[in-house]
Amino acid sequence: MTEESHQPASLAHHRGLDGLRGIAVILVIIFHSGLNWLPGGFLGVSVFFTLSGFLITSLLINECENTGRINLKAFWGRRLRRLAPASLVVIAGVVGFASWLSTSIEASRIKGDAISAALYFSNWRFIYSGHSYGELFASPSPLQHLWSLSIEEQLYVVVPVLIAGLFAIGLRRRAIGSVMLVAVAGSTIATMFTNSHELIYYGTHNRAAELLLGSGLACLCGRRIERVAVQKAKPWSTMYIVPLLGVIVLARFSSVDSPWVYSGALTLFAGLSVICLIAAVQAGPVRSILSSSPLVRIGEVSYGLYLIHWPVIVWLNSDRVDLRPTALFGMQVVVTAVLTLMSYWLIEQPIRRRRVLLSARWAGGSFVVAVAGTVVLASSILASATNEVDTTPEVLVTVAPTTSFVETSHSSSTTIVANTAVPSHVDRTGPLSVLVIGDSTAENIATALAQASDGSLGVISGGVLGCPLLKVAQVRDRKDSQQDVTYCPDNERLVHDHVSDVDAIVVVAGVANQWAYQYAGSDVWIEPDSDQYKADLDKFLENIEAIVAPRGLPILVFETPPVRDNPKILGDDIAALVRWAEVIDEWDANWHSVKMVPYADALSDPNSDEGKAERPDGVHLAEDFGRELARVTLIPRLRDKYFDILDEMNQTGCRSADTHSLALDLCRAAQ
C-alpha cells in the first residue's frame, strides 16, 4: 500500500514484493465490495503493515551501517513525497463530492474524518468519536479506510527515531532486531488484555506488532534474504506455496468478527506474511507467480488503488447505478483503475521523482499549505452540516382517511364512508391511508409503499434514522457503543398529531428497537432480554391505543426480518431480534385492534447474493426491489390485515357501531 516500489541502490528491488503487494490490495478491494467472496480480505492490510515494516527498516538499517547515522529529515521527506500528495488530493476530492452527494449528517461525519485523515490520526478518531447509530447506518464514511495510513504514518515517526537512538548507543542489527521482537511481544500482550474490539482493530499500539515483526525480520535476516535472492531455486522452495495459500484461505473463511482477530493472533498472521515475503524474494514457484506482470503492475499502483477504491465503492453504489452486484463491482473496479492511473502519472510520480517541487523547502512548505488547505476546505465546504436529523413527518402520498369518521355528501351520491352499523364483513375495496412510525426501516418501507401506491394508498412517513419506538435518551448496541438519540421524535406525540389524517397506524421498528436503552435522567440500562423492556413497550402500545381510541384506528405492526450478519455496524443480536418478535406476537394475540404484517418470507437470506441485491446494506430495501415487493406483497398484506382487524373489532364489539371509537377493555383479547 505505502511501501516504496523502487528502492535506493543499497536495497535491491524485488518484483515479487510488488506482486505480494498486488495480492494484498486485491484482497482488500474484494473485501470492500460487499459481495462476501472474501469476508476476511481485510487481512490484506496486515500484509501491507508487515511489508512496510520490512522495507522501511531495511532502508534505515542500511543507512545506519553505510553512513553511521539516519538522516531523519531526508527519510520523512521521502515518505511525505510518497504518501501525502495522493492522499490529500483524495481527501479534498471526497470533501468536494460530499457537499454534493451526502446528507447533512453524513457530511458532518466526513468533515471530521477529512480533518483527522489529513493530520494522520484517523484511527484514533474512529475509536473515540462515538459516531451515532444513525450516522453509521445511513452510510459508511468514504474516508474510513485511511485509518491504516494513519497507523503507518505514526509508526514511520516512531520506528526511525527508535532505530537511530538504538544505533547511537551502540546496538547493531541483531540487537536492534531483538528490541523489535520485544516490542512485538509487548504489542501482542496489549492486544490480549484489551476488551474493546475497536481499540484492538484501530489502536496504533495494538496493530504495531504486524509492522514491527517486518522490522525485526529486516534486522535479523535482511542480509541473508538479499543473498538467497540471487541464488538458484531450492528443491523445497515449492513449499512456500502453502503460506501464500494460507493467507488466501484465511481471507476466504475469516471475517471481521472472527474471535481470533481480536485475540492477539494477528501477530501469528503477520508471521505468515513474513514467510510470504521471504518466498516473494527467494527463487522458486511463488516468486515466479508473484513476479508476473499483472500482479507487479497492480502492486506498483497499489497505494493509489487503496486510496481511491473505497470512496468509489461508497458512492458508486446500487442506489445510483441500477446493476446487479457483480456487474456493479466490475464498474467500480474500472472507475477505480482509471482514477488510480491518473493519480499515479499526474500526481504521485511527478512529485516522487522530483520533477516538481524540487527543493526540500518548497516541498515542505507545499505540504504544510496543502494540509492546512484541506482542513480549511473541509471546515468551510461542509460547515453547514450538522448532527441534526430531520424528524419532520413527510406526506408521501395523499389519500383522504375513510374509517375514522362518517361523512355522507349531500351534494353528491358518493358516500365517503358508510359504516353506520356493525356489518358482518367490511368493504375491502376502499382506499386506505396510514401513518408509518419507527426507525430508518420504517422510512424505507414507507417510501416503498408510496412508490407502489396506485392512488388507493396514502402514506405519511414518520420513520427516523436510528430511533427506537420509545422516547429515550441513549441506546447501546451489543458492542457497547453508546449513542445519543435525543434527536428522535416522540412517537406518541406524532400519532396524536396525525390521528385524524389516517385510517391506521403502521409500526415498523428494526434494529434500533433491539438495543439496550436509557431514559433521560437515569443511569439504568434496560436490556432487550429484560422484563422491563417488554413492560415499557406494552405501555407504549397502551398509550398509542388510548390516543387512537376516539377515532377507532387499528394498529398494524410489520415483523422484523433478520438482517445481514454484521453486528459491528448493525447490532443484529439474534436474541434481541427474537425478543422483539415475541413482543410483536403477543401484541397480535392480546389485542383485537392490533395485527402483525409478515413479510420475512418474501426476502432472501441477507447474506446471499440475492439478499445483497434486495438489501444492499443488509437492512434496507433497494429502491427497485422495494417498490416491487410493496406492489406484490406488502400492500396486499397490509390491506388484508387492516380489513381483518376491522372485521375482528366489529365482531367483538371492540369498535362502537355508532361512534366508531374503541372500547379498550373489549379490545384486549387477553388481560
Image (cartoon, rainbow, N blue to C red):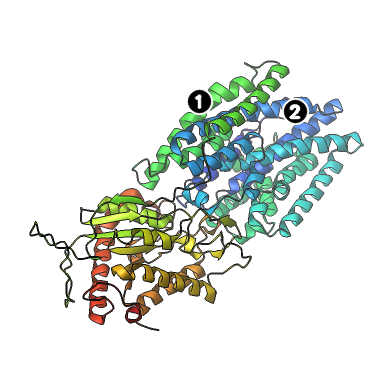
456, 17: nearer the viewer: 456
Please state the horizontal and vertical placement of residue 570, each as a whole percent of the image.
50, 57
Badge 1: few (under 14), some or many (20 or more) residues near its Cα, within 10 Å?
Answer: few
Q: Image height check: is 90 above or below 221?
A: above
Q: Is residue 153 visible?
A: yes
Where on the picture, by quarter, is residue 154? top right
At numbered mark 1, what does the secondary structure look like: helix, strand or loop? helix
Asked if 336 appears above or below 626 in the picture, the reply is above
Image vertical order of residue 353 relative to residue 106, above or below: above
Residue 69 percent coordinates (x, y): 85, 28
State how far apart marks 1 and 2 are (Cα): 26 Å
Query: Is 535 on the left or on the right of 353, as rendered?
Result: left
At label 2, the amino acid type is Phe
* Residue furthest to the front: 410
Between residue 145 and residue 332, name the one nearer to us. Answer: 145
Q: Is residue 309 left or right of residue 438?
A: right
Is the C-beta separation of discs 1 and 2 under 8 Å?
A: no
Q: Position of residue 165 (x, y in %)?
A: 86, 36
Say if residue 554 shows up in the picture: no
Residue sitting at the far bottom: 671
- The residue singled out by tag 1 in the image is 342
Does residue 77 lie above or below 216 as drawn?
above
> In the rendered image, which residue does mark 2 sit on?
75
Labels 1 and 2: the sequence-earlier one: 2
Give the residue displayed 32% in from the left and 51% down from the top. Answer: 395
Q: Residue at x 72, y 25 (%)?
A: 77
Compared across the picture, whether 342 is left or right of 435 comes to right
